[in-house]
Amino acid sequence: MEKSNPQPIFSVSDFIAVVNQTFEYAYPNIEVEGEVASFKVNQGKFVFFDIKDSGGSIGCFMTVWQLRVPIEDGMKVIVSTVPKLTNWGKFSLTVKSVRPSGEGAIKKSFELLKMKLDNEGLFAPERKRQLPTIPSHVAVISSIQAAGYADFIKIIDDRWGGMKVDVANVQVQGIVASDQIIRAIEYFNQQELLPEVIIIIRGGGSADDLSVFNDELLVRSIAGSRIPTLVGIGHETDIGLADLVADVRAATPSNAAQILVPDKKEIIKSIHFQISSLLPRIIQMINKYSQTNIDYLDNIIGKITIKIDQHNMYISNLRNILSQLNPDQILARGYAMVRGIIKVNSIIEIETNKAIIKAEVKNVFNK
Amino acid sequence: MSSTNKSIQEKTVELTKLVAWFDSDDFELENALDKYKSAEKLAEEIEKDLLSFKNEIQIVKQKFDNKS
């Protein structure tokens, strides 16, 4: 009697498939931390590297599009991965994402990406667009549970009104945050009625939390937005790549609100000041016109006075001439007037300054 | 652009023009008082609008956790 065999017999391909199914079931998503070694990119598409520690080393594979942060040999990273047995029987990790681990690696990765994007001109000042002075429709990308979002909304409500604010509720930390923010940017850029500004905000956090905003694809998405961007991430001293690529960078979410809209209280104060300055201006103009009229009148009076003086002078001169011709004036100078017929024995009248004399003519001589 | 904000902007532009008229060569004392009254009325309207308008905040329904 033939004995049945309880152990299944696999083909090689089936066995590899079963092993991979087991891996997927047992380790659907694991994270492995280690140091990068033998990093290389083949054909500009495929990324190969080993991840190792003092006790071992595993080969890793991923596509270049999945590599969102620059890495290099010696850098400590955490890979999110699925273990896989290849058709050639080699065990490797198929990496879904990789992120630097530890302060040194995060900083190194940040500097490498910053240099790369800077060389492409993504941070150039000439790329920066101005935000509208008073926007009426804006889009906010943030987590609505975040304190930074609450601060932002409170301040825009305090400062301005009548604005349409569309909010995309996304995660702002963790492995999925970058992709969610990218999708939100795409969503707003595809709207029929485009918002005038996209504001991306998040409160403060650890360097690891804020590393979401140093993701290469997110930075490129912000750079490619048709809508001008305002980014307010973390605290004043945190400057990430998203800040550098944004059209306008705010130090904090609260600062983003201050940049976005004017303060209505300041505007009301300014309007009051403008109106209060108008009446004094009218009075100033009235005074100016009055002074001009006074000046005209003074000028006219001055000219009339000169004419009168000229006439007075003329009359005075005439009066002097007349005075010189007055007979009394001549008599006063010692002359005398003689009346009557000048002949011998006739009686004539002589008038001097002080007397009228009757006299008889004794002789008449021709001169 | 929402109609409320547009209205505020229009009124603000109009007020700015009115105020600028007082400093311009077009200034005429005969019209100054009427212009002043118009500016004062506009300022009151702008202040009233600014204090009464509220922002309309809407959370978009679209989910961003997966590619749609």
Image (cartoon, coloured by chain):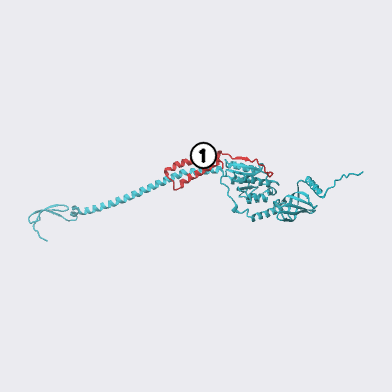
- Give the residue furthest to the left: A345
Residue A122's spot in the image, x, y percent?
A: 63, 53
Percent coordinates x, y for residue B2 in the rendering: 56, 41
* The N terminus of chain A, quarter of image: top right
Which chain letter goes with mark 1? B
The front one of A85 and A314 is: A85
Viewed as shown, does residue A85 lie left or right of A215? right
Outermost residue, bottom direction?
A: A367
> Is residue A97 found left or right of A288 in the rendered image?
right
Label 1 SS: helix
Residue sitting at x 21%, y 54%: A324
> A256 or A304: which is nearer to us?
A256
**Would residue A2 appear left or right of A321 to someone viewing this image?**
right
Image quarter where the C terminus of chain A lies is bottom left
Q: Is residue B49 above or below residue A112?
A: above
Colour given to chain B in the rendered image: red
Residue corresponding to mark 1: B45
Q: Nearer the viewer, residue A304 or A24?
A: A24
The residue most toward the right is A1
Chain rendered cyan: A
Q: Tell me how many marks there are.
A: 1
Q: Could you say where residue A178 lies in the image, as x and y percent from the top left? A: 68, 47
Q: Is residue A237 at all visible to an observer of this figure?
A: no
